Image (tube, grey):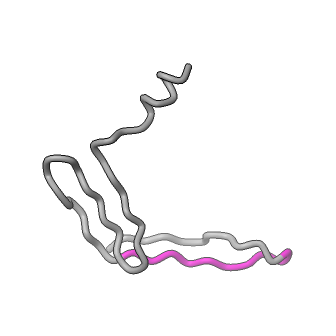
Amino acid sequence: MLKKFRGMFSNDLSIDLGTANTLIYVKGQGIVLNEPSVVAIRQDRAGSPKSVAARWS
């Protein structure tokens, strides 16, 4: 069971959801994506944050 769970993850790929840019790094290739990213968040009536949009350029 643990082996199957660990198989869902990879140590060859890394994603950095930074403050302004999203970076994707692939082992052996370096950074393959470096794009501006935006996430819009709004609060529902109870005050809980809800993600309403995400965009990469």
Residue 33 position within the rendered picture, expressed as x and y whole percent measured from the top left? 24, 63
Q: Nearer the viewer, residue 22 or 56?
A: 22
Is 33 part of what is drawn in magenta? no
Q: Which residue is drawn at 42% across and 38% down?
A: 9
Residue 41 in magenta? yes
Residue shown at the point (20%, 61%) measured from the top left: 31
Q: Residue 35, located in which quarter of the rendered image? A: bottom left
Q: Tell me which residue sits at (38%, 80%) in the image.
A: 20
Q: Is the magenta stretch mostly helix, strand or loop?
A: strand
Q: As drawn, is 6 to the left or to the right of 48?
A: left
Q: In the rendering, at what x and y percent does residue 2 appear?
A: 53, 23
Residue at image x 70%, y 73%?
49
- Specify the quadrant that holds the N terminus: top right
Q: Is residue 44 left or right of residue 1?
A: right
Whether residue 42 is situated above or below residue 27 in the rendered picture: below
Q: In this view, does 4 lie above or below 30?
A: above
Magenta stretch, residue numbers: 37-46
Question: 10 and 38: which one is in front?
Answer: 10
